[in-house]
Amino acid sequence: MNIVILFGLMLILILMGVPIGITIGVSTAISMFFTSSMPLMFIAQKAYTGLDSFPLLAVPFFILAGSLMNNGGISKRLIDLADAIVGFATGGLAMVTVLACMFFAAISGSGPATVSAIGSFMIPAMKERNYRGDFATALTASAGTIGVIIPPSIPFVIYAIAAQVSIGDMFIAGIIPGCLIGFSLMCVSYFIAKKGNYGSNERRAKKNVLTSLKRSWEALMMPVIILGGIYGGIFTPTEAAVVSVVYAFIIGKFVYKELDFEKIYKSMKETTLINGSLMFMIGLSIAFANYLSLAQIPKTLASLLINLSDSPFVLLLIVNIFLLVIGCFIDNIPAVIILTPILLPIVTQVGIDPIQFGMIITFALAIGFVTPPYGINLFVACSISKESVEKISVALLPFIAVMIVCLMLFTYFPILTMGIFKFIG
């Protein structure tokens, strides 16, 4: 009964357009009131104590580091480097967009931030050079999903806390999948651009990669410092986030010399607003997850799923379909907190490593960044290009298809996620 009330209320509130944080809190409170004797104070207590977490401090610092880098002039330099590497090829600007998103993902840790930073340059540039607006917008929105896969990834931090696994291991596990997703999107964009004769008026000379690298290597060192510091035992992931802020400030202020007081204030304001909304959602999601555990809802759902099929292949397929649907309606971070305690016990029973599942759940939900009605990457890209969501949704189909193929590969071929650990340890 409590499952029906809880998830039924959540569905109704989501369809009504109620913000996800309020939806989680209200549905948890009403379900507790009617189906248990627990006091409603439980929600406030668990939300407060859940946020009192040292690893969770990494989130605002990674957000601030990405914002400082973006406002400090890094986006244009990363685009120039990507242009030097692949810009001369057929559909060059499309591939530049994907590669630039991969570079920026290694700094920001956020999908929407990646779309905003790279899309503001690349969408107008592609439209000027004979690329269709819907294609340019769909590609940029899709490439932005890499922002939560290539480390440092904010959703990886949240999953690691929820699943009680190493944040550093999650970061390492995202390297190969992030590169594979980027390469897959580049291949699709190449064939679409070639078939549609996009960029037919481009006459581009091959740029010097070393020259572009000299202008941007300082920014590309950030993920090296973060991962090297964590795995070298120099600092914890939270301390790495603080180091990344200091590094971003030094590079933007004293190396690129584009970070003035106004831009620093803008970065602080952006971080405060984003972190405030995130912590509100995270706190209530933690309370929700605690209620699920006390009500034994994960155990009930696990039994239900296992009764449907005892085949690991079928179970994982069901889980992936479920995640893809949920990603259309709920933001990545609260969905990770809510679903991890429900689904992790199920997938571990069929032999999935918690680190691999972190990759699966994060990417499956990230595909929801480009699917209506939630689709935050989609809305950010559309606001830049001024194209309609309906028009872009059609252009997104080949990119969504190839991302789902990548998701299946990560699910059924664990070496793509876990193989890198054989080389480092």
Image (cartoon, grey):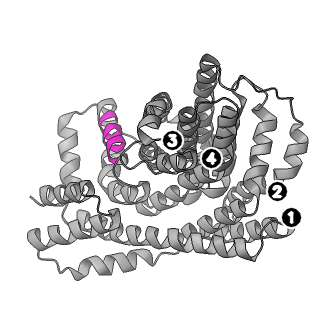
Q: Which of labels 3 and 2 is toward the front?
A: 3
Read off the residue under disc 3: 387
Magenta stretch mostly in which secondary structure?
helix
Identify the residue shown where x is 41% and y is 62%: 162
Give the residue at the far top of this rendering. Answer: 195
Residue to which mark 2 is pinned: 218
Mark drawn on residue 202: none
For disc 3, the neighbor class at 10 Å (few under 14, some 14 to 19, many from 20) is some
What residue range appears in magenta?
A: 317-326
Image coordinates of residue 355 in percent, x first then y, are 48, 49
Question: Could you tell me which residue is drawn at 75 percent across and 56 percent down?
Answer: 74
Q: Secondary structure at mark 2?
A: helix
Which tag is nearer the camera, tag 1 or tag 4? 4
Residue 387 is covered by the magenta coloring: no
Q: Amino acid at mark 2?
A: Glu
- Mark 1 or mark 3: name the one nearer the start of the chain: 1
Compared across the picture, whether 215 is left or right of 195 comes to right
Left or right, 387 with reference to 422: left
Residue holding disc 1: 255
Any part of residue 234 in sight: no
Q: CA distance from mark 4 to mark 3?
A: 13 Å
**Does label 3 or label 2 sit earlier along the sequence?**
2
Instruction: Identify whether 272 is placed above or below 307.
Output: below
User: What residue appears at the point 38 percent right and 72 percent down from the top-left corner?
Assistant: 283
Q: CA distance from mark 2 to mark 4?
A: 22 Å
**Between marks 1 and 3, how big is the CA–CA gap?**
37 Å
Task: Determine the secondary structure under disc 4.
Answer: helix
Q: Nearer the viewer, mark 4 or mark 3?
A: 3
> Along the line of sight, which residue is nearer the eye, 107 or 200?
200
Tell me the quarter of the picture where residue 200 sits: top right
What residue would you read off at disc 4?
119
Q: Are marks 1 and 4 in contact (CB under 8 Å)?
A: no
